[in-house]
Each structure stands twice: as structure tokens, then as C-alpha cells.
Image: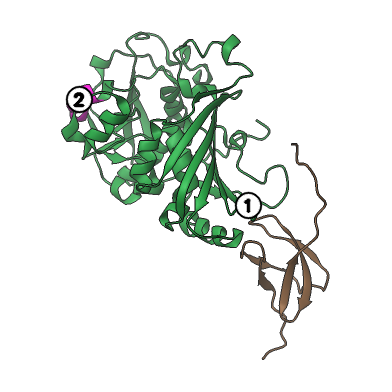
Chain colours: A brown, B green
Amino acid sequence: MSDTITTQAACPECDAPVGFEREPLSGQVSRCSDCGVELEVTCLSPLTLEVAPEIEEDWGE
Amino acid sequence: MTVTASIVGGTGFTGGELLRLLVGHPEVEIGQVSSRKSAGKPLHTSHPNLRGHIDRLFCVPEEIEACDVLFLCMPHGKAAADIDHWRAIGKCVIDLSADFRLRDPAVYEQWYGGVHPAPDILMHAVYGLPEISRDSIRGTPLISGVGCNATAMTLALLPLARAGLIERVVADIKVGSSESGAEPGAGSNHAVRARTARTYSPFGHRHIAEVNQSLGPIDLDATVTAIDMVRGVLCTAHVEPKEPVTTRDLWKLYRETYGEEPFVRIVADRTGPGRFPDPRVVVGSNHADVGFAVDERSGRIIALCAIDNLVKGAAGSAVQAMNIALGLEEHAGLGFPGLHPA
């Protein structure tokens, strides 16, 4: 097993690859470019992303 | 490689949209454009947006000469009646009416209420929706245009149909006023049409036959409603699946189907006002935006597709099919990304 930090992980919402240009930090927030969900880095090894809590809005309805 | 393209019936909305796309096409030279009622008048009298882009007069249909591609933009039933004549003029004929969309003459008769004028030709026409029949379009001399509502339904449902997931589906379709064409009717004058939300086909729309031909015998019905929009179709299909699915499952299916498609975009964001397909976003473009959601409570899949009815739902698909048929770049002449805000 390597301790190297992976700079790409799967989006937990849509399974798209989510990459980081630099080594991610724990708690860092990113966004999936496919489904647009906001993601939080919850673990660095292995790199794990979870859907970040949302602020509910009505989006115009 | 430059190909000459002419248009029969060029005063309508689809003829105008074809001209708009073809004047910007890098490998097309526009030949003749016919209109019996507007013969001798400049094209911009019918299509004012083209003033300064093309200096040409409408001719009568009898003056149309041999060309590489002949687009037929006549009312339903007219193209089939003279199809042998048109095929002798155009090396590749693309008919934008409904005349050659259905391969089975009996199905045509059932949905269009009359005997097909050229039933022997039906089997030779290739349905012109590249996402369904790209390989068959290559090199073919006769291409059928697509129905706009059918295109929206087909593209919304294609990944689910291919996966055999559809138990039953009802498509709610909202359409703009340009679907009814350039000729005025009782339902299209401004006082009646503006600010409407009028269901005009609660069930049994003709385009269901087209969708079934493309997707197979799925249990499908559709309700079509005219809304206050000039261009656009939004299909919201309510699918009862054969087995439970998750959002991740749908992402996988839609990516598998559309990952390589140049004009289909998956729009299924989790948040934001643009999280699902919206016809306004694709106005003027050949894009089809598809999206989906799963109701975890009921298991229902909501499959969506937004197109511009005049582009992806008519002239844009026809140009895309022409490009494929003639071996041109598939996206040639179709690079316009749409407007925002529109």
C-alpha cells in the first residue's frame, strides 16, 4: 500500500472523476463539473469526497 | 469539398432555419430556394434575419436544377407525392416533413390517416436522427427529417429504453408557437396564442409512432401543451421503471449513450436554476440537453430533454444528417452555442 495522496476521486453523486490540481486539504470544498454538486474532502488517504451540506433555495419556483 | 444545396419550399420556418445554418456552413454553397407564392422575391422578404447574408431570389419549384443535396420543406404529404422527381434532381434528398419518417406503410396510415403515396420508398428512407441511425445515414441518398416532439421524447428516453428499464412512460411536452409553422391558423394569432398554457393533444400524439419506431414497443403516451414560448420543446417524461434505479445508475446509462455525441449534453446538476434542461438555453443551437431525476419515494424516473424545435427538432438535425451522409465534419455549420440570456 502506498501512502501517496491520490489527486482524483469519484464524485459520490454521479461517479464522475473529480480532480485536484494540487494536493487537496482535509475539509477542502470542490465541485463536480458533471453534476454540479458541492463536495467536501473528508479523508486524504484514501482520498474521499462527500456531498457538502446545501443551503436550500427555491430556484425560482 | 463544396456541396451545392437547394431547398424546395423555402418560405417556412424550417426553410428559413436551414438557410440560416447553411449560409454559415463552410462546405456548402446554397443553390436555389423555391417558393411558389414568393417566386421572384428576395429571400429576406421571408427571412429578415438573412438580409445581407444571402443575395438570392426565390424561384418556382420547376426551376430547381440538379444539386448535391436537396432539402424538401413542404407541408406533410407533398414530398412523397413527387419523390421520384426530387430524387432525380438531388443526389441526396432530405425531406423535413413527416412523409418518410415511418418505415411501415400501415403505421403511417394509422397515425396520419391516409394511404402513403409512395409506400415502396418508405423502406429506403433513413430516419435522420443521428443519435439513432448515424451508421445508416452515411452515404444514403434519402433521409427523413425528424419530428420535434419525437426528438425530445426519443433523446430523453433513449438510455432508459436501451437498458430495458421502461415499464410505462407518459411524456409531458411543452412547446413553443413556431411548432405550428409560418402559416397562421385559428390557434396561432397573437390574441389567442400569447400567454397561453393550452393543452392541444392530451393523448395519442402522432410523434409517438416515431418514438416507438426508434426505441421499440415501449408503453408510451404523451400530452402536448402549447406555452408562451416561440422556439423550444421541453419533454418531461414520467417513467415507471421495471426495477429500482439510483441517480448514479442513470448517470452511467446517460454517459454510455451520449458520452460521444457532439450535440447531446447531460444537464442534471444537483442545484442551481440551470440544473435541468431548459429550452431557452438551447435556442438557435443544435444542442439537445437531457437530464433526469429519481423520486426515491415512488421510484419514478423523471427524464427530460430540451431542444430548439426548429434546430435539433428540424433543420439542425437535417444539416447534421447531411454532414454525416456526405462525409463532412458532423458539426460543420452547427457550432452556434445558443444564447444566454435569450
What secondary structure is marked by label 1? loop
Where in the figure is residue B188, as x and y percent of width and height?
Answer: 52, 14
Give the residue type that dot 2 points to.
Pro
Where in the figure is residue B318, as x and y percent of width and height?
Answer: 38, 36
Q: Chain of mark 2?
A: B
Looking at this view, is B178 or B240 the one in front? Answer: B240
Residue at horizontal 70 percent and vertical 74 percent from the top: A7
Picture quarter with the C terminus of chain A: top right
The residue under label 2 is B117
Image: magenta residue range: B80-89
Principal SS element in the magenta part?
helix
Give the residue type that dot 1 points to.
Asp
Where in the figure is residue B222, as x and y percent of width and height?
Answer: 47, 35
Residue B155 magenta-highlighted: no
Where in the figure is residue B13, as x and y percent of width and height?
Answer: 45, 22
Picture quarter with the N terminus of chain A: bottom right
* Mark 2 or 1, closer to the camera: 1
Q: Chain of mark 1?
A: B
For marks 2 and 1, the one nearer the N-term is 2
Residue B86 magenta-highlighted: yes
State the image quarter where residue B40 is shown.
top left
Q: Residue furthest front?
A: B298
Left or right, residue A59 beside residue B106: right
Looking at this view, is B70 or B163 the one in front? Answer: B163
Up the image or down, B145 lies above or below B328; here it is above
Up the image or down, A7 lies above or below B205; here it is below
The residue under label 1 is B295
Residue at horizontal 41 percent and vertical 23 percent from the top: B15
Up the image or down, A31 lies above or below B182; here it is below
Left or right, residue B190 beside residue B181: right
